[in-house]
């Protein structure tokens, strides 16, 4: 006596084979008697799966055929259970004379029931039928304690079907679809013939589906921003602004501490004059002492230039080591009157701060330049030790705030692109 064949393992749909009454092609039913409609993948006829004779509900007259990205019969482990893809539906809507299409894949597990993958322009959602009736009020919907914002409403039309479905389906079916979003979730209602069904979708990456169902190749690349696509930049923006606030407070505390502790010791001051004879050769100042710890040094130049300029090549040189810190400063000031009134440009005074100068004996080498006919230009040079370098703190502040501003701009732009796809309620809607 031969042994009985083993039963189907848990979670594996039972497959039933039938024949299409229109073309005679074999049919496969996978949803264990739960199918209400089945589509012949050979001739496209839509059949009544609950009729013993598989009554033809609709013949497929168009030559159009589609190949689903996820083939029917594909199996994969999803959300802890093994599902099989048993149905495929292509739907379209027309908004402002533009046709938009998306695809829906029906999945089945004998213990978990049905769920759906939806795809539009490479954006995917994992959807299930809502377990409770959402509350709606104006442009808001509330489901299981979470509030969703109205996003769009449209008339969806079925243009192609394949496989089996637990409801009667036909090409040409239409329904009113309304979406409410709370990324990464979308709450959708579909109303047809005064019957409304609610589904909850969660945004997922196509790569997750391809991995779970071991599909060949790669999923289509997502294009644009989808209605419930999570904004990772928005999350990053909130986090980086918090980090910015903390670091800016630390930076301000350091600045305040340095302002209080700075000694501001004036170690050298001398007045010189640029001679009208033309370019003057360089000269050196008397030595001065920079005592104490390594600190900043400010070199300030004060002049009485008026509609003139002077350029000073400076070098702060350590007497013992010969280490030179070269820098140049231009001092210019111009003023006058025109049709708009009085105007001025530049300043007769200038300051330069050299950070982290070690202690020791120093002198300045100065080489002035100006126009040959500018006359004598007196200028006073003052060297002050241990002065807070405000510019360094401003640079540090900019380094902190610029990334936060950039990420915030990206987040704003992301939301702008998302809501640019939103549509107003249909005429006659109570929303």
Image (tube, helix red, strand yellow):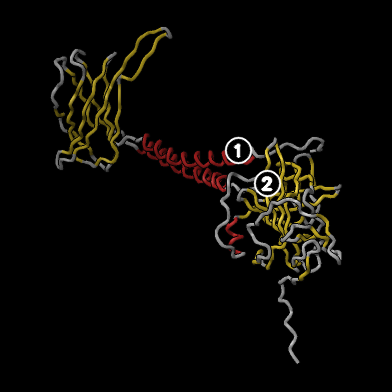
- Residue 416, label in figure: 1
Q: Is residue 423 or residue 17 the one in the foreground? A: 17
Q: Quadrant of residue 296?
A: top left
Q: Secondary structure at mark 2?
A: strand
The answer to whether residue 202 shows anywhere in this view is no
Q: Quadrant of residue 114?
A: bottom right
The answer to whether residue 28 shows anywhere in this view is yes
Residue 28 locus on image (x, y percent): 74, 67
In-image side of 419 versus 169 (left or right): left
Residue at the location (51% across, 45% down)?
A: 240
Name the residue beneath numbered marker 2. Answer: 101
Q: Secondary structure at mark 1?
A: helix
Other-residue count near label 1 (Cα within 10 Å), few / some / many at <14 / 14–19 / ≥20: few
- Precedes in sequence: disc 2 or disc 1: 2
* The C terminus sits in image quarter: top right
Residue 155 position (above or below residue 344): below
Residue 238 position (above or below residue 335): below
- Seen from this angle, which residue lies furthest front? 23
Residue at the location (60% across, 56% down)?
A: 206
């Amino acid at each position: 006596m031969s042994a009985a064949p083993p039963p189907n393992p848990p979670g594996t749909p039972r497959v039933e084979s039938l024949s299409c009454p229109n073309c005679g092609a074999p049919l496969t039913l996978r949803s264990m008697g739960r199918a209400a409609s089945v589509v012949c993948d050979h001739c496209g006829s839509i059949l009544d799966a609950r009729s013993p004779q598989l009554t033809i509900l609709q013949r497929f007259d168009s030559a159009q055929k589609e190949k689903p990205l996820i083939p029917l019969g594909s199996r994969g482990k999803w959300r802890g259970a093994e599902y099989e893809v048993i149905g495929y539906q292509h739907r379209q809507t027309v908004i402002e004379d533009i046709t938009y299409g998306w695809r829906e894949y029906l999945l089945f597990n004998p213990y978990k029931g049905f769920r759906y993958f939806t795809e539009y322009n490479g954006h995917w959602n994992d959807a299930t039928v809502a377990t409770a009736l959402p509350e709606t009020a104006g442009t808001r919907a509330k489901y299981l304690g979470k509030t969703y914002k109205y996003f769009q409403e449209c008339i969806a039309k079925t243009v192609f079907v394949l496989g089996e479905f637990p409801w009667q389906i036909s090409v040409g079916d239409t329904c009113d679809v309304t979406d409410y979003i709370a990324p990464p979730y979308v709450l959708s209602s579909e109303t047809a013939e005064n019957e409304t069904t609610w589904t909850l979708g969660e945004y997922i990456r196509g790569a997750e589906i391809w991995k779970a169902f071991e599909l060949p190749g790669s999923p289509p690349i997502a294009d644009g921003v989808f209605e419930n696509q999570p904004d990772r930049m928005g999350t990053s923006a909130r986090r980086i602004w918090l980090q910015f606030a903390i670091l800016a407070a630390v930076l301000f505390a350091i600045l305040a501490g340095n302002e209080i502790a700075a000694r501001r010791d004036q170690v050298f001051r001398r007045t010189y004059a640029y001679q009208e004879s033309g370019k003057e050769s360089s000269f050196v100042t008397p030595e001065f002492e920079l005592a104490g710890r390594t600190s900043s040094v400010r070199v300030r130049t004060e002049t009485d230039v008026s509609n003139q300029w002077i350029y000073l090549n400076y070098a702060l040189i350590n007497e013992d080591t010969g280490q030179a810190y070269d820098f140049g400063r231009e001092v210019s000031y111009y003023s006058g009157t025109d049709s708009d009134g009085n105007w001025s440009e530049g300043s007769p005074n200038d300051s330069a701060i050299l950070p982290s100068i070690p202690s020791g004996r120093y002198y300045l080498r100065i080489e002035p330049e100006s126009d040959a006919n500018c006359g004598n230009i007196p200028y006073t040079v003052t060297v002050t030790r241990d002065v807070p370098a405000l510019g360094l703190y401003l640079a540090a502040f900019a380094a902190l705030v610029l990334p936060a501003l950039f990420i915030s701009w990206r987040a704003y732009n992301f939301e702008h692109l998302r809501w640019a796809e939103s549509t107003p309620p249909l005429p006659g809607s109570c929303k």
